[in-house]
Amino acid sequence: MTSQRPVALVTGASRGIGRGIAVGLARAGMNVAVVYRGNETAAGETKTLVEAAGAACLLVAADVAAAGDRDRLIESVRAEWQRCDLLVNNAGVAPLERKDLLEATEASFDRVLGVNLKGPYFLTQAVARWMIDQQKEHAGRRFRIVNIGSLSAYTSSPGRGEYCISKAGVGMMTALYADRLAEFGIGVFEVRPGIIATDMTSVVKEKYDRLIADGLTPIGRWGTPDDVAQAVVAIAEGRLDFSTGEVINVDGGFHMRRL
Ligand code: NAP
C-alpha cells in the first residue's frame, strides 16, 4: 500500500542509536523501515515501540555490506510503501577485537570497512537514484540522507584503526553526496555522536565512566540514543533545509579544543 506518511529507512535500528532514531522518527510522523542484521528479538522490540508511537513499521533483515541484501532491502520498502523520503545510514560495527595498529588484521579491516563505509556508500547510491526518480513524480516531497559518523573520524585510537578509517570515510562520503545531490534538492548530513550508552560501548563502560568523570567532555555525562535521535529528527523535519554537507556533533562538546 502506498504510504501517506513520509517513510524513513533506518539501518541498524534493532538496537542502540538506530532504535532511538526509529522511535524518534515515528513520533515525528514517519513510517519506518527497521533494518537489522540478525537480532530478530531486538528488532521486534523496536517494531513494538515504533507502532506504539503511531507509525507503521517494516522489519527487514539485511547485511548492508552485501550487495544482494541492499537490493532486496530497497525492493522490500518499495513493495511495502512505494516511497522513501529519508535514509539513515546508522548500522555500524566495532572491530571484534581491539588490536594495536601494528598487529591488526586485513580481515578485520575488510569487515569493518564493508559494514561502516562500503555498505552505506552503495546503499546511498541506490536510494539516491530512487529518490531522484520519486521526485519526478512528486515535486512537493523533500528527500534527505543522514549518515551516522563518529568522533573517531578525527580522533586517533590506534587500538581500532580500521574503525577510525571507516568513520573518516563517512565524513568524505557525506561531502561527496551532499555535493552531488544538491541539484536534486536532496540534503545530506552527518550526525557525529560522541560517547553514547549502547551495546557497542558497554564493553568499555568502566574506561569511559572514568574519562567522563575526569572531565573528557564539557557536558559531563554519557550521551543517549535519544540525544542522537533529536538531531536526526530536526533534519527530518526540515529545520536545516538551507544546509547540506553539514556535520552535527552530538558529543557533549568533545570536539572542542580546550586549554
Ligand atoms: P550497536 O548497539 O552495536 O547496534 C548496532 C546495530 O547495527 C544493530 O541494530 C545491528 O543489528 C546493526 N548492524 C550491525 N551490522 C550490520 C550489518 N552488517 N547490516 C545491517 N545492520 C547491522 O551500535 P550503536 O552503538 O547503536 O551504533 C550505531 C552507529 O553509531 C554505528 O554506526 C556506530 O559506529 C555509531 N557510533 C556509536 C557510538 C557509541 O558511542 N555507541 C559513538 C559514535 C558513533 P543486529 O541487532 O541485528 O545485530
Image (spheres, rainbow, N blue to C red):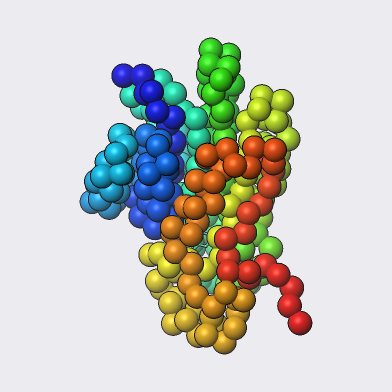
Q: In the rendered image, which quarter contains the C terminus?
A: bottom right
> Which residue appears farthest toward the top when viewing the image?
137
> Could you tell me which residue is drawn at 40 percent across and 53 percent down?
20
Residue 59, quarter of picture: top left
Q: Which of 113 and 199 is in front in this view?
A: 199
Q: Where is residue 147 in the image (x, y as percent from the top left)?
A: 57, 46
**From what the image shows, is residue 201 above or below residue 248?**
below
* Residue 86 coordinates in the image, percent (x, y): 50, 35
At a point 47% along the width and 52% down the height, the residue shown is: 229
From where the camera sits, is residue 167 visible? no
Q: In which quarter of the image is ligand 1?
A: bottom left
Query: Looking at the image, which is closer to me, 91 or 31?
Result: 31
Residue pictured at 33% horizontal, 24% vertical: 80
Location of residue 158 (image quadrant): bottom right
In this rendering, is residue 8 above or below 50? above
Residue 175, picture quadrant: top right
Place of residue 10 in the rendered image (x, y in percent of width and height, measured from the top left) = 43, 42
